[in-house]
Structures are given as C-alpha cells and as structure tokens.
C-alpha cells in the first residue's frame, strides 16, 4: 500500500509538471491559428497588407546589405550601425502593422484556444508521446503511453544542447565529416535523451515528439537505439512525428474540413537565372521582350542555382494523380504572384520544391524562393514569406516543403522553431513535411517520390509514409548516411484516432517498382 501510494504521488507530480510545461508552449502558434481573413476583412485591410509587403521588402534588402557589410568591414563600420538602426525602425513599423491586422482578424469571431484542462491527449495503442523540457539548470523528459506517464531527469541542458548541436553540425557537413562521425554523434545524443526513456519508447511503434531548445534541430529518425543487441536507426523500427505542444493535439483549432477530393498543388523548378534557356525561349517568342529586354535582377538579392531534379520530382509525383486533380506551377509559372493568387484551401496536398531561406533574427523574412522572372520574362519579387503564408487558409492533409531548411526558424523560448513549417501547420495543414538542413535535390526527388507512393497507394499517414521511404533508402545504400536521408521530418497538429486510417486517394496508375 505504501509503495502504491508513493507511485500515485509520483504520477500526480509528473502529470502536474507536464501540464505546467506544456501549457506554456506554442502560444504564438495558437495566435496564428486563431486569425481569420474573410473577403470583407481583406478588403478592409488592403492598405495594411500592402504597407506590410512594402516594409518586408525594405527590411529584406537592408538585412542583405547588413550581412554583406559585416562580411566586408566588420561591426565597427559606421554604415553597419546605420543599417542596424534602419532595421530596428522597420521592425517597429512592421510590428505596428501586424498588431492592427491581428487585432482585426481576431475581432471577427476567432478565438485563441486557451483551455488546458486536458493537456494529455488520448493516445492510440502503440503510440507514445515524448516531451522534452530544457531549463536553465535542469532538463526533464516525459513518456506518455495509454494510461501511464513516466518522468525522468536528464543530463544538464548544456550537455544536451552541445550534443544536439554537434549532431546537427555533422549532418550539415556532408563533405568534411565522415559518416562514422555522424553515427558517433547520433549514438552519443541517443544515450543522453533516448536511453533513460528506452523501456517505454521501445514497445511503441509510433512516436510523437515535443522537442525543446537545441532538440528542435535534431532528426529523431536518425538517432540510434539498441535492437537485438545492436544499435539501429530509430526509423527502422518506429514512425516519428514532431508536434509543438500536447495541448493542441486535444484542442479544436477550428480547422476547415478536408476536401473529399485528392487535388494537389505542385510548385517546382522556378527560373532563377537570367541565362536560363527557358527564359531565353520565352523572350524569343515574345515580340515585346525582343524590343524591351528584361531588367537584371536586383543586385542586392543572392543568386540561386536551378533545381533541375525538382522538375523531375514534380513530374514523378504528378504521375501518381489523375490529371484533373493537379494544379502545377513550374518553370516560368512558378512565381510568387501566381502562387499567392491561388486559393490554397482547395488542395488536399500541397508540394513546393524550391529554394528556401531561414532568417533567424527576423522569422517573418524566412521565405520560399520562387522564380526571379515571371511568365513575361520580367523581374519578379520571388520571396513567399512567412507573413504571406500566415494569411492563407489551408485544409491540406499534407503540405510538403521540399526546400532547404524549411523546418527551421527562429528559436523562441517555449515556442520551438517559429518559421515556415510551423506557420503552415497553424494555418490549417494537418501535417507538414519539411527539412532540417540542405540536401541535394536529386536525393530529395527520390525520397519524395517514394513518400507519395506509400502515402497514396497504401493509405499510410505521412509519418509512416516518410519512415517507409527512409527505410527503403537505407536498404539500398550501403553507407546508410543519415545526412542524405534523414533531413525531412513530419510535424503534426492533430493525432489520428485508433483505427483512423487516411482516406484513400484515387491514383493515376500503378507506379513502376524499383
């Protein structure tokens, strides 16, 4: 009886600590999720939207100029100090405009979820919820399985952060860090953050992970666990999803109903360079362009190379859908203007394969980089920013950002990484697939093609489909280098109920087998 009493007391303490930590998470996510933009509101705020767009363009130009100046002259350059002051003032103006927009959007019937009465969602059999909290001096982890909660104290936050940073750094440095170095870093971190929870994690097929701090940068699929006396990648035995907080998994966010159709939006292979042959052909066929050459791109903008394999990626994915269910923006049509003119809520799947940038100082400037030139051969504003995505309403079952570092953003205490991926999740996507570091577009193309194959033909959820695609890649590659297959992760804002399989999608034809 005494032991049972202590166990009950320990469980109550673990639950209280879990609830306290979780209630503080993802509040900005809730704010973004709660905003509603009706046609009437959009017309009312048109001047604010236009002003905000102008401010972001100015802010992006000055951020670029600051980076260039710092590299050339250092922080003591008077021009650097002037640019820093300009950026601060522009950010103040942006904050003012955003406050007006957010206030009005919330005033039109939207409510921010606030209830945390039940912070532990109902879990299906075979699922474990793993939550981490890295404080200033102590670190803790919770493993929640159906009917049980377990709580452990981990190594110091500094040790965990250093190990996580070393692992992420090794994955980014494909050329000068050997695969053995990555495996050693994975093993070290696994022993620190997975080992203490192993008894509760190993039996569960499905892992839902709430990372914190430096762990936001960790691909949990590439960590190592003991299996049959040997170490193996977690993905070989478990399907992994990431979520910002447990409370949102059990809190209605007023998400629009999924479409009964399987329509997909594909965006890929934009035109980035002035000497792109597709642009030359366009200008040659245009009489206006022959008499009025296109302007050169803004010199303050960096150059991007063509993502040739992203076009093949889009074609392979499109082949798995009926032709009438595909909207495609590729080549000269893959522009910011064309993408933002679409109603994103009509798509069950959204797939964007472009370059991406992350701005750690100003998360709203993190962007998907669309074409530098439009269908007229003229220079185009190419950045689809987080602020643009925050205005969209999504009903997508899955949104895939097949671009570099789209899972990253600005690290905000108790918020995780605030950026493109988290914003799409907040705006209604059931799941977002995005990357933690740059990977060759040929590798991404192959992985994404297999991902859709498993998701569509076998009615797998996105986490299971991605894990299966990764396992297939590992089985073919002798080196099994996680730098090549583990960059993508699945983030979710809802949990499937037990037995709730994804609704099937009609596919065009049976895809070829390897």
Image (cartoon, rainbow, N blue to C red):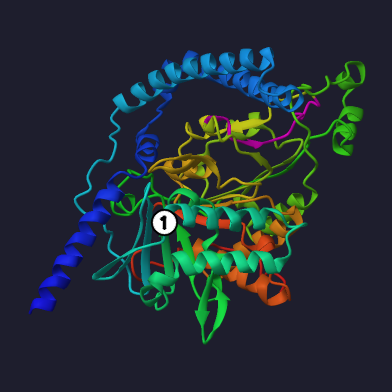
Queried whether the magenta region covers residue 284, the answer comes back as no
Residue 206: percent from the left, percent from the top? 43, 69
Q: Is 336 above or below relative to 198?
A: above
3 displayed left or right of 205: left
Q: Secondary structure at mark 1?
A: loop
Q: Nearer the viewer, residue 476 or 284?
A: 476
Residue 365: percent from the left, percent from the top? 57, 30
Residue 67: percent from the left, percent from the top? 68, 27
Q: Quadrant of residue 495?
A: bottom left
For the stretch drawn in magenta, what is the main secondary structure? loop
Image point (86%, 30%), residue name: 274
* Residue 495 can be seen, yes or no: no
133 displayed left or right of 365: left
Image point (91%, 16%), residue name: 291
Instruction: Find the residue positioned furthest to the bottom.
Output: 228
Give the number of marks. Answer: 1
Residue 7: percent from the left, percent from the top? 17, 72
Image point (72%, 73%), residue name: 479
Q: Which residues are magenta?
A: 364-377
Q: Nearer the viewer, residue 385 or 166?
A: 166
Q: Is 56 above or below relative to 491?
A: above
130 displayed left or right of 410: left
Queried whether the magenta region covers residue 370, the answer comes back as yes
Q: Is 415 above or below relative to 17?
A: above
| Residue at image mark 1 | 156
Q: Is 385 above or below relative to 21?
A: above
Q: How many residues crowd around disc 1 within 10 Å: few (fewer than 14), some, or many (20 or more)? A: some
Query: The C terminus appears in which quarter of the rendering?
Result: bottom right
Image point (28%, 59%), residue name: 121
Query: The N terminus appears in which quarter of the rendering?
Result: bottom left
């Amino acid at each position: 009886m005494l032991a049972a009493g202590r166990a009950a007391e320990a469980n109550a303490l673990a639950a209280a600590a879990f609830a306290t930590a979780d209630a503080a998470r993802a509040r900005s996510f809730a704010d973004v999720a709660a905003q509603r933009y009706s046609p009437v509101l959009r017309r009312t705020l048109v001047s604010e939207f236009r002003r905000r767009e102008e401010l972001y363009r100015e802010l992006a130009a000055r951020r670029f100029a600051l980076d260039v100046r710092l590299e050339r002259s250092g922080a003591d350059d008077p021009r650097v100090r002037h640019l820093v002051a300009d950026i601060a003032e522009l950010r103040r103006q942006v904050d003012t405009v955003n406050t007006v927009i957010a206030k009005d959007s919330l005033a039109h019937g939207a409510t921010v979820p606030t209830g945390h009465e039940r912070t532990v969602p109902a879990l299906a059999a075979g699922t474990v919820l793993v939550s981490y909290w890295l404080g200033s001096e102590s670190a803790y982890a919770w493993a929640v399985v159906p009917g049980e909660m377990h709580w452990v104290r981990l190594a110091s936050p500094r040790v965990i952060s250093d190990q996580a940073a070393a692992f992420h750094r090794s994955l980014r440095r494909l050329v000068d860090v050997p695969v053995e170095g990555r495996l050693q870093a994975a093993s070290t971190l696994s022993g620190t953050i997975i080992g203490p929870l192993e008894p509760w994690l190993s039996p569960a097929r499905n892992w839902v992970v709430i990372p914190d701090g430096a762990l936001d940068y960790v691909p949990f699929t590439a960590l190592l666990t003991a299996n049959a006396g040997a170490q193996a990648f977690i993905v070989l035995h478990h399907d992994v999803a990431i979520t910002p907080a447990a409370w949102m998994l059990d809190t209605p966010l007023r998400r629009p109903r999924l479409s009964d159709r399987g329509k997909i939006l594909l965006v890929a292979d934009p035109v980035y360079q002035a000497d792109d042959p597709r642009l030359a052909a366009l200008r040659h066929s245009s009489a206006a362009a022959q008499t009025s050459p296109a302007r050169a791109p803004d010199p303050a903008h960096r150059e991007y190379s063509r993502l040739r394999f992203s076009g093949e990626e889009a074609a392979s994915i499109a082949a798995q859908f009926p032709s009438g269910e595909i909207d495609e923006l590729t080549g000269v049509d893959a522009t910011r203007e064309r993408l933002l003119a679409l109603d994103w809520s009509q798509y069950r799947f959204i797939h964007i394969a472009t370059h991406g940038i992350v701005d750690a100082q100003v998360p709203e400037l993190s962007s998907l980089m669309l074409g530098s030139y439009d269908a007229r051969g003229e220079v185009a504003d190419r950045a689809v920013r987080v602020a643009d995505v925050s205005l969209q309403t999504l009903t997508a079952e899955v949104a895939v950002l097949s671009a570099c570092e789209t899972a990253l953003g600005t690290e905000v205490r108790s918020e995780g990484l605030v950026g493109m991926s988290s914003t799409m999740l907040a705006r209604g996507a059931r799941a977002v697939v995005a990357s933690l570091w740059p990977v060759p577009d040929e590798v991404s193309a192959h992985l994404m093609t297999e991902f859709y194959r498993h998701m569509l033909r076998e009615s797998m959820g996105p986490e299971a489909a991605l894990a299966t695609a990764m396992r297939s890649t590992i089985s073919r590659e002798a080196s099994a280098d996680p730098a090549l297959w583990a960059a993508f992760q699945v983030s979710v804002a809802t949990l499937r109920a037990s037995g709730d399989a994804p609704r099937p999608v009609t596919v065009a034809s049976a895809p070829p087998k390897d």
